Image: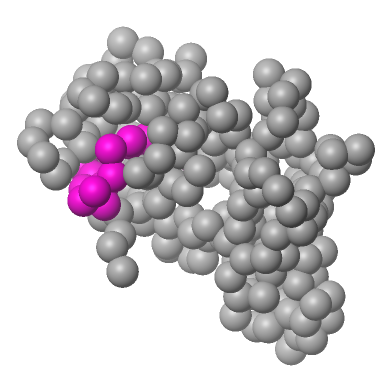
């Protein structure tokens, strides 16, 4: 079975500081990996995804993530946080032959201090 | 930009009552999903749907739940006899790809069962 663990339910950074949100996954076959963001009272928006190919993937709003198979990780980073990045971030995994079913992590709430 | 819409945004119902949550997926998408998020918990997969059939369902999706595509645009989730523990945010998602690589989520319906 697949699973996702996000380390840290709350992360707080200062504006301009590095954002690092951690995600580790468990999968018996090569996974598809995703990061979604949820702003208050809104749905889930895809930030970025890894399916195959280059292990460093870039997404919207300056975010990027690196798939590290040896560490079973897919951490999300952004060099410089903006106030507008404050939101809930979800890491998710799926398998090609499971028809797109997404397994989500618990979520990490990112706060950005001025 | 096309988007998934859901109605209503909020619904309050009495235990034992039937509720129907409605979703309008993106028009050229063929794969549809329902997820739910109980307050403070993970987003959980409920069901996937393609070609007027359920592709996969989770253990949560028992006989009290059903899905339907009654016409060419709507996708509905029915809960036959609601329980207190059905209180959650319900998200609809759609994808044009069978692998569900990019699922577009609606803003959700917050269901409260009293």
Residue B79 part of the magenta-drawn span? no
Which residue corresponds to the image point at 36% horizontal and 56% vertical from the top-left?
B107
Q: Quadrant of residue B29?
A: top left
Instruction: Tell me which secondary structure the magenta stretch mostly adopts.
Output: strand
As rendered, which of A101 and A49 lies closer to the eye? A49
As rendered, which of A42 and A2 lies closer to the eye? A2
- Is residue B26 depicted above or below B21 in this figure? below
Q: Is residue B68 in view from this perspective?
A: yes
- Image quadrant occupied by the C terminus of chain B: top left
Q: Is residue A8 in view from this perspective?
A: no
Which residue corresponds to the image point at 48% horizontal and 15% vertical from the top-left?
B59
Residue A23 screen position, x and y as percent:
77, 47
As rendered, which of B112 and A43 lies closer to the eye? A43
Which residue corresponds to the image point at 46% horizontal and 39% vertical from the top-left?
B100
Horizontally, is A79 left or right of A52 in the view?
A: right
Which residue corresponds to the image point at 67% horizontal and 65% vertical from the top-left?
A58
Residue B35 part of the magenta-drawn span? yes
Horizontally, is B69 left or right of A97 in the view?
A: left
- Toward the top, the furthest residue is B63
- The magenta stretch is B22-37
- The count of marks equals 0
Residue B79 screen position, x and y as percent:
26, 25
Residue A105 screen position, x and y as percent:
67, 41
Q: Quadrant of residue A76?
A: bottom right
Horizontally, is B14 left or right of A16 in the view?
A: left
């Amino acid at each position: 079975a697949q699973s996702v663990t996000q380390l840290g339910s709350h992360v707080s950074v200062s504006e301009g500081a590095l954002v690092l949100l951690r995600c580790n996954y468990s999968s018996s076959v090569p996974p598809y990996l995703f990061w979604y963001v949820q702003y208050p009272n809104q749905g889930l928006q895809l930030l970025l995804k890894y399916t195959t190919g280059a292990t460093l993937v870039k997404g919207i709003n300056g975010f990027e993530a690196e798939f590290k198979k040896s560490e079973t990780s897919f951490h999300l980073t952004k060099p410089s946080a903006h106030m507008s990045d404050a939101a809930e971030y979800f890491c998710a995994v799926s398998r090609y032959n499971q028809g797109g079913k997404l397994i989500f992590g618990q979520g990490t709430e990112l706060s950005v201090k001025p | 930009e096309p988007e998934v819409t859901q109605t209503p945004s909020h619904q309050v119902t009495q235990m034992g009552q039937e509720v129907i949550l409605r979703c309008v997926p993106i028009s050229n998408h063929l794969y549809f999903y329902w997820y739910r998020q109980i307050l403070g918990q993970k987003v959980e997969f409920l069901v996937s749907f393609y070609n007027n059939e359920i592709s996969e369902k989770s253990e949560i999706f028992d006989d009290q739940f059903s899905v339907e595509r009654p016409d060419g645009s709507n996708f509905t989730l029915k809960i036959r006899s609601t329980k207190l523990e059905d209180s959650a945010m319900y998200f609809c998602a759609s994808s044009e790809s069978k692998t569900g690589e990019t699922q577009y989520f609606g803003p959700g319906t917050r269901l409260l069962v009293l």
